[in-house]
Image: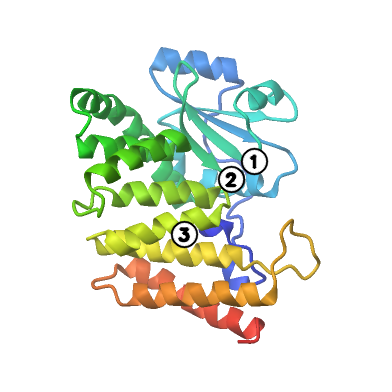
Amino acid sequence: MQNKLIRFALGALAVGAAASSFAQIKWAPNFQAALAQAKASNKLLMVEFYTAWDANGKKLEEGTFKDNTAEEVAAKYVPVRVNVEKEGKDLGAKFHITNYPTVLFIDHSENVIGIIDGYETPDEFVKHGNSFLKDYSEFPGYEAKYKANSKNLDAIAHLGVIYANRYQIAPALSKLAEAEKIDPNNATDKLSDLYNFIADYYQNASTFDPAIKYFQKTADTSKSTDKRAYGYLSIVSCYFSKAQLDPEGVYEHPITLEQARSYIEAARKATDACAKLPNLKDEDKKILKQDQVNIKQLQQQLGH
């Protein structure tokens, strides 16, 4: 559920930078020095690819990286910043960096084990930074379980989640196909996280239709209220993004007024379904309430 992708002319959705100077993160002087330090300390690398002009990069550096908890997570890695228009140009090309900022988490062999694509709040950064470490430590064990028994649903689902978390969508979808052959109706609830992580990948790539498809699978089949709520609220976020208005014709694929109205109506239906879930967490209730307010405002803007 990536609200950072929503773009509205609504003040309530604006995110501001929280500070005006760099955090206390101890950045390595350059990539090679960071790689050597990582090998010596047996840590993974955290590489921020940035440009001097990107506003989201400045928000990440001046807001998120100023957060104490985010700084603690960064300290678990060897962090280094590279300007993709200067000293990091070749490195950016090597890792196919096309969006700024991008934060790569890589091992000593320069294999990518995690990606943050764009701006993230401190909470999002902390969640992902810790999850990449967990994935990295657990991957060999799940891989061994899978090699010992290719029908081990737990191993298949966990490997798929890790692949999706690394933006390796082809192997993630392959693992999903294997999992669905074993449990086509998600009766075990072991596919729910995999659906959500694959959907997150597509949402981060602004490919909203497949994202909605997989979020809906979780919402329809999971036994967990928390996972179903994540699915429904993420669907709302996707439809909000699909309903971007284009008064100046600046978007590559502008939509019609009727399309925007249909997207907001679909978002409303998702909030209605979410509101009916039992035992919603307070955090989800807060997001749901704000989504409902935003829907009413957008309906007014769109002439509903």
Which badge, 3 or 2, comes first in the chain's sequence? 2
Tell me the CA gap for discs 1 and 3: 23 Å
Q: Which image quarter: residue 281? A: bottom left
In front: mark 1 or mark 3? 3
State the residue at coordinates (43%, 14%): 39
Q: In the depicted view, which residue is nearer to us: 65 or 3? A: 3
Residue at label 1? Answer: 99
Query: What's the amino acid at mark 3?
Result: Ile
Instruction: Tell whether 251 sits left or right of 7.
Output: right
Q: Given contact means CB atoms under 8 Å apart, are the residues at marks 1 and 2 in contact?
A: yes
Q: Which image quarter: residue 135? A: top left
State the residue at coordinates (60%, 64%): 242
Residue at label 3? Answer: 212
Where is residue 83? Give x, y as percent: 69, 30
Residue at label 2? Answer: 118
Q: How is the image coloured?
A: rainbow
Query: What's the amino acid at mark 1?
Result: Asn
